[in-house]
């Protein structure tokens, strides 16, 4: 849903989201989850996984895991810190847009302690057992930041798995093995 709003027709998207929210409210009321109880809840953080790159979500969700939050450029970051409608002149309106963009905590903008704090908040709020920090091989800022992110999250008691991959499927078996091992670690937590 977070990714589709970049591309979809606003009217069609809004209608689809409203229908989805109605369905989810009924499912919550009836305690009817998508995954069985005991499925390991994880946050995915790091590089954007733009549509149609479904490799990592597929590997996680076919390994007794469920992604409950996505902290990336195409995750919640796109709708956090919305631009405040303030100002009467073009310059004042541009200042409001600039203020919003200076809040973005992408790996390109360092240091960015707010990103780490937000990952911690998401993990707690969404009852996630751990974080999978995802880096695409060509996205150097997230690769460079992955070590410090893992170190800080682990220090805070949040198990973290760093994965670096590309769009190809050649490493899918290797990634699945690592994700399954991480899931076993989380079950012991």
Image (spheres, helix red, strand yellow):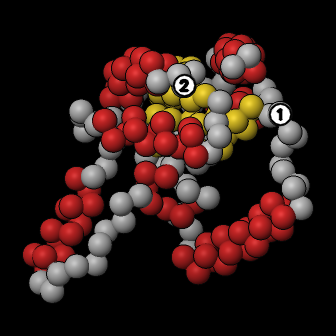
Q: Residues within 10 Å of mark 2 (few under 14, many from 20)?
A: many
Q: Residues within 10 Å of mark 1 (few under 14, many from 20)?
A: few
Image quadrant for the N terminus? bottom right
- Does residue 14 sit above or below 38 in this rendering? below
Q: Residue at x 49, y 19 (%)?
A: 154
Residue 108 x %, y %: 28, 36
The answer, for residue 154, to whether it is visible in the render is yes
Q: In which image quadrant can residue 141 be found?
A: top left
Residue 51 x %, y %: 58, 48
Residue 82 vs residue 142, the one in the foreground: 82
Report the disc number at residue 15: none
Q: Earlier in the sequence, mark 1 or mark 2?
A: 1
- Does residue 69 sit above or below 152 in this rendering? below
Q: Secondary structure at mark 1?
A: loop
- Does residue 152 sit above or below 30 in this rendering? above
- Does residue 168 sit above or below 174 in this rendering? below
Seen in the image, is 148 located left or right of residue 92?
A: right
Q: Which residue is mark 2?
A: 158
Residue 180 vs residue 122, the one in the foreground: 122
Q: Which residue is mark 1?
A: 38
Q: Secondary structure at mark 2?
A: loop
Residue 169 x %, y %: 66, 24
Residue 103 vs residue 126, the one in the foreground: 126
Q: Residue at x 27, y 61 (%)?
A: 100
Residue 104 x %, y %: 31, 49
The answer, for residue 164, to whether it is visible in the render is no
């Amino acid at each position: 849903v977070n990714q589709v709003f970049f591309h979809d027709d606003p009217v069609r998207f809004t209608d689809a989201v409203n229908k989805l929210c109605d369905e989810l409210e009924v499912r919550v009321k009836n305690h009817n989850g998508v995954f069985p109880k005991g499925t390991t809840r994880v946050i995915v953080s790091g590089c954007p996984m733009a549509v149609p790159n479904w490799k990592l979500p597929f590997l996680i969700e076919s390994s007794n895991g469920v992604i409950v939050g996505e902290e990336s450029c195409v995750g919640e970051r796109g709708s956090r810190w919305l631009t405040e409608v303030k100002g009467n002149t073009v310059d004042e309106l541009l200042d409001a847009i600039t203020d919003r963009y200076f809040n973005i905590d992408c790996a390109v903008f360092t240091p960015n302690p707010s990103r780490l704090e937000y990952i911690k908040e998401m993990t707690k709020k969404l009852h996630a057992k751990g974080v999978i920090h995802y880096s695409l091989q060509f996205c150097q800022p997230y690769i460079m930041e992955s070590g410090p992110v893992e170190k800080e999250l682990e220090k805070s008691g949040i198990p973290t798995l760093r994965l670096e991959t590309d769009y190809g499927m050649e490493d899918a078996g290797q990634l699945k093995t690592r994700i399954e091992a991480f899931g076993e670690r989380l079950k012991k937590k």
